[in-house]
Structures are given as structure tokens and as C-alpha cells.
Amino acid sequence: MNQAALQLEEQYAQKFAKAKKAHRTKSLLKGLLFLLPSIILFSVFLFYPLFKTIYLSFFLTDSSGATTVYVGLNNYINIFTSPLFVKSFQVTFLFVLYTVPGTILVSLFLAILANEKLKGIGIFRTIFSSTMGISVAAASVFWMFLFHPSIGWLNQILAVFGIDAIGWLTDPNSALISVAISTIWMNTGFTFLILLGGLQSIDSYLYESADIDGASYFYKLRRITIPMLSPTLFFVITVSFISAFQTFGQVDMLTRGGPQNETNVIVYSIYQDAFMNYQHGVASAQAVVLFVIILILTLIQFKLGEKKVHYQ
């Protein structure tokens, strides 16, 4: 009798295990079905271009982009021994150094101002965030006019104070800084909105408690606002960092990498090699190097930055 009961129990256990496995398989298939559109899009526009770029980086190509000769790591060796690539590498890091802190500081200052409960502050919030709705091409044309050596407003303002005109985009000493200024202006709108949202999510009782204790404005800013805003700051710093490495539009519109390659960032160098010199293998190698640089620096940022992030 006991043996029959054990057999029956074993049969039930096997049926239950089969039913559980079937349920898991069904759930997996259902989940994959929901994810299928995203998987297809990522495969077509992300995974395939990534692996294709890695593949091309080991070959020489013709003008149509078709592979001709396998050269192994020669493309990577050539770009790291090329003075032009080394120059674009340096220019890119300088550009990131100029734009990321500048964008964060300006946006944070404007967000703190716009977070004040003042009459008509909504108008200023709209003004501060308006750059987000302007395309890179349109903004570049606007800044091209401002930087014009003879009719540009910036040089006309300098002339009022008796200061000689500056070749904002034609002088090698000022071209990169000029492009960086325009980039900070373009990126301020998005960063401002994200930081403003982070400020408005901070619980008001923290400020009320600080007011009861007689804390000053700057003490609250240092001890409450910045620490509670740290997750948002970490996000915008990471996004701004990646975006700065991928800058292309304003460089192409304002300077085309000149003068004397002083604004020739890596992405523009990739564009020149791929679509102007038709060296798709070399361009692919540069793209892979840029991907690895961004990946490594982002991982370092996550490793070091998350330790200083304070979550509520």
C-alpha cells in the first residue's frame, strides 16, 4: 500500500514539474513575443552596425565600403601612429573638459533659480528650456552669425568697448572654445529640465526642518539640495559625458574640423575618413576605439560616482 502511494506521489510530482516547466516556457515565449519589436529594432539599428563596424575595422575597403584586403590590427596601429588621430583624440578630451562642467554648472544655476516660488517664474522656465526645441543645424547657424568676424554681434559688442575683433571660429586659439560655448548653450535646455525635475522631487519637509533650526540659504544648498540632487546629477553628468564624446553637428556646421584641425573631434575624423576619404576600415577602427573609450570611462564613472550618490 505504501509503495502504491509513493508511486502515485511520484507521478503527481512529475506532472507538477512538467506543468511548471510548461508554464515557464509559455511565460518565456510570451515575454519574448512582447520584446520582439524591440529586439528587431535593436538588432537592425544597434547590434548589426556594431558587429559590422568591428568586422570592417580589420579590413581595407574600396570606395563603396566593400572589404578588399584583410589587414588584422594594422588599421588600429596606423590610427594610433597617425598625428591627425592623436590630435583629434586630444581635441575631443579638451572639448569634453570644456562642455560637460560648463553645461552642468550653468544648468544647475538656472534650475536653482527657476525652482524658487516666484510670480511669473514659469516664463523663465520656458526660456531656459527653449534651447531643447532647437535643432543643432538651426542653433549652429545662429551661433555662426554671432561669431561672424565683421557683422557678428559679439565683435560689435567688443568694438563698443574698444576691443579688437576676435576670430572666434577662424583663430586656432579660440575656435574650440567657441564651439564649446555654442554646445553648452545647446545642451543647457535638456540638462536644465532634468535638474529642475530633480529639485522639485526633494521633500519640502527637509527645508522646513532646516528653517526651524535657522539654517541659512547656502547651508541648505550645501547640506540638503546638492546631496538630495546627487542621483539626478549623476545621471546628467553621465549623459552629458557620452553626448560630448559623440559631438558632430556643430563642428561640421561651424568649423568643419578647422582651423588647423583644432576642432577636429574624433567623430568628425571618423566622418572624414568614411565619407570623404572612403577609408571605411580606418574609420571603423576609430569608431571601435571611441566606443571602448566611452565604455571604459563610463564604467569608471559608475564605479566612482555611485559611491557619492545619496538616495532618499
Image: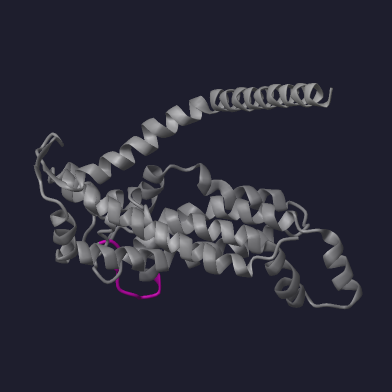
205 shown above or below 71: below
Whether 305 is among the magenta residues is no
Q: Give the x, y percent position of residue 66.
A: 14, 35
Total marks shown come to 0
Q: Give the x, y percent position of residue 6.
A: 78, 27
Whether 167 is among the magenta residues is yes
Residue 260 visible at all: no
Name the residue rendered at 77%, 57% in the picture: 118
Residue 304, quarter of picture: bottom right
Front residue of 159 and 178: 178
Q: Of all residues shown, which one is farthest toward the right? A: 212
Q: In this view, does 235 lie to the left or right of 90?
A: right
Residue 177, quarter of picture: bottom left
- Which stretch did the figure color magenta? 160-169
Name the residue rendered at 20%, 61% in the picture: 85
Q: Give the x, y percent position of residue 158.
A: 38, 70
Tell me which colouring the rendered structure shows: one colour
165 shown above or below 73: below
Name the residue rendered at 51%, 58% in the picture: 238
Q: Give the x, y percent position of residue 173.
A: 27, 72
Which is the main secondary structure of the residues drawn in magenta?
loop
In which quadrant is the C terminus drawn? bottom right
Front residue of 158 and 81: 81
Residue 107 visible at all: yes
In which quadrant is the N terminus drawn? top right
Front residue of 172 and 105: 105
Residue 202, quarter of picture: bottom right
